[in-house]
Image: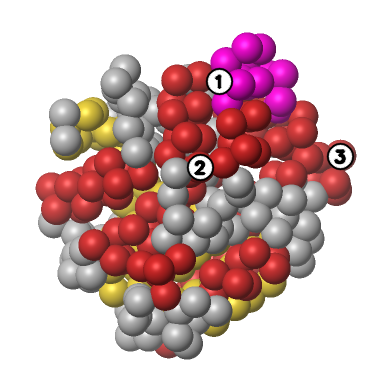
Amino acid sequence: MEVAQVNSVALHYRLSGPEKAPALVFSNSLGTDFRIWDEVEAALSDRYRILCYDKRGHGLSDGPEGGWGMQDSVHDLAALMDNLGLKSAAVCGLSVGGLIAQGLAAERPDLVKLLILSDTAAKIGSPDMWSKRIAAVRQDGIGAIAEDILQRWFAPDYIASSPDFPMYRNMLVRTPVHGYVTTCQAIADTDLIESTSALQLPALAIVGDKDGATPPDLVRETAQLIDGCRFELIRGAGHLPCVERPEAVVSLLSEFMTGNGHG
């Protein structure tokens, strides 16, 4: 097990691939751990030095009792990359991981050579929406809202036929409540429209065409904030294309990174 102490928090991570290969970093979504990247990582780990990690309050990483904001999660990733000697990386963030990736690109451009935004936006949801979700989880637990979330996460065909689907439900409902609601509040408090609009680096935005959490139009709007950002729709996927359509994600990422001199 690989664990790093950064900013007084223990972060669980996995580092794979050739030591001197170009760096590729994945930051995952609310209510998941870094296993959502398993198939994408496996397909790319022969060519890239890949970092997957559990953000605060998720997976095996710490979730400090005092709470945290989005900037804390950005600083965690920056410190983790510094500790591991990773720089000039392609950084791919999904959902809240995409907020972290945008924040990192704005604060630490030395760490981010390429930005990949998967099913995310510069601002996600409204404070009222997040307040209602936080209240529901605090009262009845994540299980009480799990079915609604999973309907937004996955395309109907995947829910109906994939033997892996129950495992992702388990991943969601076993997320620590404190980690989940604190991250919800961090998302509610985050608006990166101004800083993301100022980014100047190669960027790719991808989204599942059946994403009910960050719909394609929302992702497209964020892509349009970044000059030259490429937008790609992944057919037959919901909010987690890396799970439902890993081969499509691998193809898009490979083309983008190679085309920009990264690997």
- Kindly identify the amino acid type of the residue bearing the numbered disc 1: Arg
Q: CA distance from mark 1 to mark 2?
A: 22 Å
Q: Which dot, 1 or 2, sits closer to the camera?
A: 2
Q: Total of numbered circles in the picture?
A: 3
Say which mark, if any, is on residue 160: 3
Q: CA distance from mark 3 to mark 2?
A: 32 Å
**Place of residue 233 in the rendered image (x, y in percent of width and height, measured from the top left):** 69, 71
Q: Is residue 55 magenta?
A: no
Question: What residue is pinned by disc 1?
Answer: 174
Between 261 and 226, the one lying in front of the other is 226
Q: Tell me: 101 left or right of 180.
A: left
Where is residue 10, by image quadrant? top left
Magenta residues, start to end: 134-146
Q: Earlier in the sequence, mark 3 or mark 2?
A: 3
Q: Is residue 255 above or below residue 46?
A: below
State left or right for residue 263 relative to residue 117: left
Kind of residue at disc 3: Ala
Say if 200 sits above or below 211 in the image. below
| Residue drawn at 62 percent across, 38 percent down | 128
SS label for mark 3: helix
